Each structure stands twice: as structure tokens, then as C-alpha cells.
Image (cartoon, grey):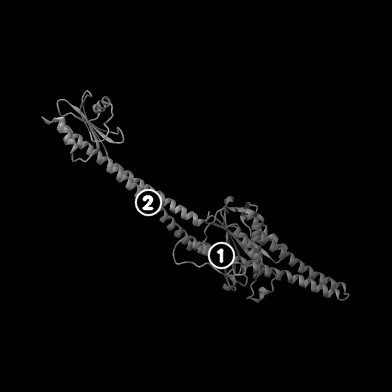
Amino acid sequence: MKIKSRITLGYAAIATILILGICVAIYEFTMRDRVQQFEHRLLVKAVSVSQALRTKGVTDEMMNSLNRNSASSLQDKSILVLDADGKQRYMFDDEPTQPLHINALEMVKLAATHNISYISPDIRSAVVYKDNSSIKPHIIIVAALDKDRILWMSQLRTILILSFIGFVVIFLVAGYFLAQNVVSSISALTNKLTQISSEAFSARLTVGKEKDELQELAVTINNLLDRLQSSFDTQRRFISNASHELTTPLAAISSQLDVALQKDRSKEEYKKVFLSVKDDVKRLVLLLRSILEIAKASGSVGGIDLSKVRIDELLMRIPVEMKKISQLYDVKLNFEDFPENDGYYILYGNEALLYSALRNIIHNACKFSKDKCAYVSLTYTYQNIVVEVKDNGPGISPEELQNLFQPFFRGHKYENTMMIHGTGLGLALAHRIIELHKGDIYVESVVGEGSTFSVFLPVDSTKTYKKTKDSLTQ
């Protein structure tokens, strides 16, 4: 069932139940009020008969004349007077009303417990009244048919039924237009979304001025589209840059081999070509490995193996790794400001990915530092392990800081950085791995003095901690 139909029927059903309850309440309260009024009239008649019986010199003929011409206007009435033993003392019936058929002894028993009782001996209503004011108590039974109430309630019932049907129709129509108004806005959003494709991904939903749920939905969808477009743009740039970076060493290898095969050359020349090709192959392998690591780090934390990792042991492996890359590289580790409790060194994450992230940051510091040395310190703050990596390199300009963690981005502002080889993927990979572990990375850099990379890793990686830039100095 469509939402429009569900809204219409739901609205109509709720309104119908309310109207039905109101109609039933009106009918029941009206019926109760009319019954009470009629019972009061019966009681007044019974009291008047009792007073007449106590009057001296009143005969049955006088009583009949009085009841026949009574102003009480009771219709189809019957009057029966019994003594305390149940014997009949007086009886009157309107013509052509049938006389009362009741058990006198039962009336005596009823009157013994209640001075006033109401019964329904037939289709009529009756009151049983016991008069104890005289020496000889007597029981007076007055029965009559409330034709006015029957006619009144019949008319009221007809009015309520017609009103109920009319209100149901009105609520169905109102519910339909209400649903149409709600669904039309949703349909407009749906139609707009169907127009958004990979070729026209910049289109966005129109956000209305009314502060309602539909506006919130449109804003949420637009934010989602912004994130998707940013992701797609990043993916396109990544593919374009990756294609270029992969093509460059392959083209260099191909051109060198073509030149080498044009004529016979000496062993030294072939060796020179092979060494150059080897460098290009190493660069290609490094590039492919980085791309694969980025692909692995781009997933969710649920898709990687997690375990307890000692951050100090992880960092102590990196100096040896840097020496393998270059004997000029040096890493200075400082754990003096870290708590002595071994439990603070442990976090929850993927050891291989965390090692890759920290290695890339430290390698980057060694490459650009003037003395080829990276200064690494370990601290603990706000339930986070903080790894700070400092260098005394050329620094990074504010313009380049904005794109520092983009894949294949390399600084070109200073000439000495152009002479340093790299893929432009190391920091991008480190950034994604740290985000995967619900951590943060901040960079402070002064041009001409060096840069400081601060990595925040939560001790419990299943939670997200809020970290501010001010906490870097604490």
C-alpha cells in the first residue's frame, strides 16, 4: 500500500473512531437523561396517587376521573395499588392499554427493601412506590410508555448516523488532500533525485523555507551528495594520478629498453641501463604497494584484524627500518614524558597498518630534515596516546598544508623538495590508517624551521574522542 493511501486511511480511521465515540456518548447521555426525566414523572404520578388515596371521601370513580384527565400526560399508563399483603386496592388502565401483568408478592418483597424502585414489566417503564405515611402502608405501581423518548431518540439516532457518515466522507477527503500535500513534497524530492546521475552529480535538492522534517531530509540528502561527490572527485583524481604515476616508470623502462636494443652496446652501457630500469622497477613496486595499502586502509574497521598493540615496541622497530632505507637516516626516540605504567602503552588496532602509518610519517621527516633526523616523542593525554614527529626541514606553507594528505600530492614550493624522490602516497596512507583507528593527525609547520606531526590514537579504538588543536600544547 502506498504512503498516500496509508496516510489517508490512517487519518480517516483515527478521526472516525473519535467521531464514533462522540456520537455514542451523545446518544447514551441523551438516553440516560430522558430515562431519568421519565422516571421522575412516573414517581410524581405515584406520589399524587398516594396523596389522593389518603384524602377522605375519594372514591374509585373520582380516582378514575382524576387519572383519566391528569395533566401529567403519561401515555398508555396503568396504575395498580396494593396493600402490604399484596391485595389489590385500586387499578386503572388507559384505553385501550392492556392491564399490568405482575406478581403482587414480588412487588411486596421489592417494596420491603426499597421504597422506590424502577422496573420494566413490558415495553413500558414503571415505578414501584411504597407509601409509609399512612397507618396502613400501600404500594403504588405506575407504568407508562415514553413515546416522546422513543420518537426523540429515533430522530437523534438518524441525525447521528447521517452526521457520522458525513464526517467520515469529509475526513477521507481531508486525509487524501493532506496525504497529497505531504507526498507531493516527497515525490518532488524523488523526481529530483532521479535526475541526479554521475553525469549531473552537481545537482542538489531545493531546500524549502519551512523548518520541517522535509527540509531536514533535503539538507541531509544534500550533505550526503556533497560527501559522495567529494569521494568521487577524490577517486577520479586518484585514478588519474595513479595512471600517470604508473605510466611514467613504465614509459621510462620502455624507452630505455628501446634505446638499448637499437644497437649493440658494451657491458658497462647495458649495466647502466639495467640499473636505471631496476630503479624504475623499484619505484613502480613501491608505488603499487602504497596503492594496495591505501585500498586496504580505505575500508571499515570491521574489515581488518584487530589486536592489542604496544605502541612503544612499534616505534622502536622504526629506527632499524630507516637505516635499511638509508644509512643517513636517524630516529631519536623520547619516552620520558610517558607514564611508567605499561598499560598505557597498549592500544587496540591493526599492528601492520599502524606500523605503516608511523613509518611513513617518520620516513617523511627523515627525508626532508636537514640533518636527516626525525625526533619522535611519546606522551599520553585525554585517554589518547600521542606520537609527535618533528623535523628541521624546509617546512610546509599554509597553502600546501590544505592538500598535504591528498594522494599523490607533493610540495613544489621549494626547490630542494623537488630533488627528493617519493610517490606522494605516504602521508595520505598514514592519514587514512589513523582515521580508520578513530584517531586524528595534526600538523604544525614553520617555513624554514621544520614541521611537527602529532598523531592522536585513542586507547580504546571502539570510541571516538574529541580532540582539539589546543590539546597539542598540553
Foreground mark, 2 or 1?
A: 2
- Whether 331 is drawn above or below 252: the answer is above
Residue for point 27% across, 43% down? 148
221 relative to 11 in the view: left or right: right
Which of these two is toward me, 207 or 225?
Answer: 207
Q: Which residue is identified by label 2?
A: 162
Residue 463 seen in render: yes
Residue 413 point in image, percent of width and height = 63, 76
Instruction: Give the residue type at disc 2.
Output: Leu
Residue 223 seen in render: no
351 relative to 467 in the view: left or right: right
Q: Which residue is identified by label 1?
A: 193
Which of these two is toward me, 281 or 369?
Answer: 281
- SS of the residue under disc 1: helix
Residue 298 point in image, percent of width and height = 64, 60
Which of these two is toward me, 306 or 319?
Answer: 306
Instruction: Give the residue type at disc 1.
Output: Leu
CA separation in Å, label 2 and label 1: 46 Å
